[in-house]
Amino acid sequence: MNAKIIIGLTLVGTAIIFIIQNIAVMKLSFLFWTLSTSSALIMTLMLAIGLFLGLLLHGSFNKTRGSARDSQ
């Protein structure tokens, strides 16, 4: 198996275990909004946003790097 896949699955598994162990309700405040929700839900949302941004930025960097190679 590819090393990147193994490392990625290990990190995702560790994140899932961490999220499951932290299910307490917490108060989240941002500017004038206040929300009481499970910390597991907040962490899952942050993980999903991070993965999405990582994939998005990875694609844009590959596109930029590919066009630089084409012009040489």
Image (tube, helix red, strand yellow):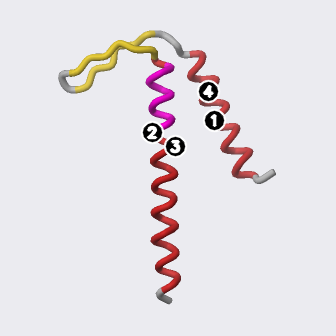
Query: Residue pushed farthest right?
Result: 1
Residue 12 tag number: 1
Residue 41 part of the magenta segment: yes
Q: Is mark 4 on a helix, strand or loop?
A: helix
Name the kind of residue labelled 3 in the image: Leu
Other-residue count near label 1 (Cα within 10 Å), few / some / many at <14 / 14–19 / ≥20: few
Cα–Cα span, label 1 and label 2: 13 Å
Name the kind of residue labelled 1 in the image: Val
Name the kind of residue labelled 4 in the image: Ile
Q: Which mark sits nearer the N-terminus, 4 or 3? A: 4
The residue sitting at 75% across, 52% down in the picture is 3
Which stretch appears magenta?
40-48
On the image, numbered disc 2 is attached to which residue?
49
Residue 51 tag number: 3
Q: Position of residue 54 (x, y in %)?
A: 50, 50
Q: Is mark 3 on a helix, strand or loop?
A: helix
Q: Which mark sits nearer the N-terminus, 4 or 2? A: 4
Q: Position of residue 71 (x, y in %)?
A: 47, 87
Q: Are marks 3 and 2 in contact (CB under 8 Å)?
A: yes
Q: Do the residues labelled 1 and 4 touch (CB within 8 Å)?
A: yes
Cα–Cα span, label 3 and label 2: 6 Å
Cα–Cα span, label 1 and label 4: 6 Å
